[in-house]
Image (cartoon, rainbow, N blue to C red):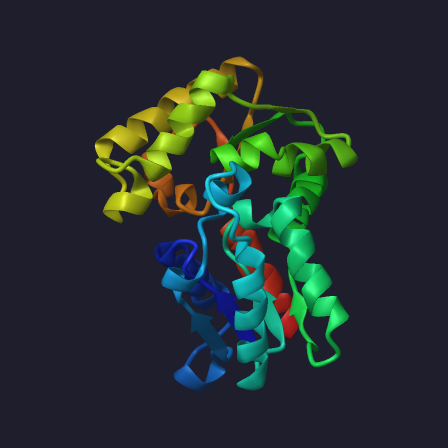
């Protein structure tokens, strides 16, 4: 059974579930894959706040417990639709916890590695522009992974990184706060895509799962967009089959 650890944020978990449905080869209900979407956002500390030192609660601890509970109901393969969760101070604690307890028997897919592997295969010679939250920027979540594959990338400057973060987190118009793609957030994203394109980026990596919620029709036609949530969904289906 497939398992989605959602709640980071809730819309991102639902989006991964939708992507799995969309990519499944099914002609009737019974053809669809068994999926558990576990969304308990109130129990998981904010990933960026932990990485930025605003809380000392590592979200990996609760996610490891959720994974254990999911295994108890039959889940074998897990996807975590949160780019920031994959920063080393969080991800490595999760893996250490899972690997150190014999009761865990799970395959937990790494969305960052899958995404960068896809880019290396399909766009190896292209400059990649990274959009993400302050947590992913400060811990260079995608930059390190791209560098290991010798893929060139560009990121917004520090002030613009804050703006991208605001497009997700701002209390008035952020995607997490409102649950929709507001005009203010979309304007910020368009401005940053333009600036990354001016730095030579043809491929834009949507390195925050809230940014994955933006309909492709609302993004510039001249760019190529890589969506880690979509890539994770396909990998989960392949792992199950």
Residue at (44% x, 68% y) in the render: 21
Q: Position of residue 93 (x, y in %)?
A: 67, 56
Please identify the quadrant where the N terminus is shown: bottom right
Asked if 194 appears above or below 216 in the picture, the reply is: above
Q: Which residue shows up at 40% across the image and 58% down it? A: 15
104 or 241, which is in the foreground? 104
Q: Position of residue 61 (x, y in %)?
A: 57, 62
Q: Residue at x 63, y 37 (%)?
A: 142
Which residue is depicted at the point 76% across and 69% down?
A: 100
Viewed as shown, does residue 12 lie left or right of 197?
left
Quadrant location, the C terminus: bottom right
Q: Quadrant of residue 30?
A: bottom left
Q: Position of residue 51 (x, y in %)?
A: 54, 40
Q: Position of residue 110 (x, y in %)?
A: 65, 55
Quadrant of the rendered image containing residue 234: bottom right
Q: Left or right? Give the position of 161 relative to 108.
A: left
195 shown above or below 241 = above
């Amino acid at each position: 059974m497939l398992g989605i650890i959602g709640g980071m944020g809730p819309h991102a978990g639902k989006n991964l579930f939708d992507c799995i449905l969309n990519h499944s080869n099914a002609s009737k209900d019974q053809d669809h894959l068994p999926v558990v979407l576990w969304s308990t956002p109130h129990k998981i500390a904010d990933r960026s706040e932990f990485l930025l030192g605003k809380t000392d609660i590592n979200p990996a601890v609760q996610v490891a417990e959720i994974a254990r509970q999911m295994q108890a109901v039959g889940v074998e393969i897990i996807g975590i639709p949160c780019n920031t969760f994959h920063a080393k101070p969080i991800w490595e604690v999760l893996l250490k916890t899972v690997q150190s307890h014999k009761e865990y028997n799970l395959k937990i897919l790494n969305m960052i590695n899958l995404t960068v592997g896809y880019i290396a295969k399909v766009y190896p010679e292209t400059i990649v522009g990274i959009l993400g939250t302050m947590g992913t920027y400060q811990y260079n979540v995608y930059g390190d992974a791209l560098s290991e594959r010798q893929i060139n990338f560009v990121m917004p400057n520090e002030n613009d990184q804050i703006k991208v973060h605001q497009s997700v987190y701002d209390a008035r118009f952020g995607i997490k706060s409102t649950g929709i793609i507001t005009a203010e957030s979309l304007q910020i994203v368009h401005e940053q895509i333009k600036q990354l394109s001016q730095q030579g980026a043809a491929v834009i990596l949507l390195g925050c799962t809230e940014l994955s919620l933006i309909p492709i029709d609302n993004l510039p036609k001249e760019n190529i967009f890589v969506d880690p949530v979509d890539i994770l969904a396909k990998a989960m289906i392949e792992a199950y089959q």
